[in-house]
Image (tube, helix red, strand yellow):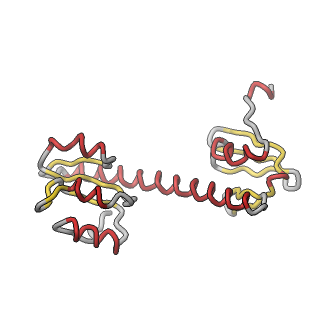
Amino acid sequence: MVNVIASARNSRQAIETLMSENIEILFLDIRLQNETGFDLLKQIRNYRGSIIFVTAFDEYGIQAIKFSATDYLLKPLDTQELLLAVEKAAVKKKERHREMQIDMLIQSFENIQNQGQKKIALPEASEIRYVPINEIIFCRSDNSYTTFYIKSVGQITVSKPINEYETLLAPYGFVRAQRELFH
């Protein structure tokens, strides 16, 4: 479902709206009064939502791609293409959310590491367990799952691949061993 939150006739109105509202998808025309949609994009580099160009001018497609647009729709709009573009935006939102979670985890971990605390957050199905890093014996990968073997707790399995933890644990002497070593 798409809810239209606002519309704007020029860059100034668009910027004001983007600053005051939580806009997840920006539908942007290439030609705006005395400027272009690309002029607007140069002013909102910190915008984290999806951008879908909607225009009658197909010669701007390559430029739209360079600006990392989610999609590029030509007028008159085809309903099916519009729905597909919105679906793409939803997928991108999930990817951005996941990237933000990983970034926050890394930042939190770096802060904890700098403060002398040595714990890691392991999200299980029903709770997040905070485990001292010096209690971790080893980790085992099973596709998109990682099982942590911990001295005092036993096993904790999380639904994230081991490569997400590899960088976090490297400063503590953890190295990634190939499966062949364990056969």
Instruction: Point out residue 157 in the picture as x, y percentages from the top left corner.
Output: 72, 50
Residue at image coords 66%, 58%: 125
Q: In which quarter of the image is the N terminus?
A: bottom left
Judged left or right of residue 90, residue 57 is: left
Looking at the rendering, in which quadrant would you find the C terminus?
A: top right
User: Residue at coordinates 25% horizontally, 67% vertically from top-left?
Assistant: 14
Q: Residue at x 74, y 63 (%)?
A: 115
Q: Is residue 144 above or below residue 117?
A: above
For the residue pair 23 and 79, the one nearer the viewer reads as 23
Residue 63, image quadrant:
top left
Q: Nearer the viewer, residue 150 or 100?
A: 100
In the rendered view, would you say 120 is above or below 81?
below
Up-down: is 62 above or below 14? Answer: above
Residue 97 is situated, as x and y percent measured from the top left of the image, at 49, 57
Q: How many numbered marks have been drawn onto this rendered protein structure?
A: 0
Q: Residue furthest right?
A: 152
Please report the residue visible at 15 percent of the width from the left and 43 percent of the height from the top. 58
Quarter of the image where one finds residue 19: bottom left
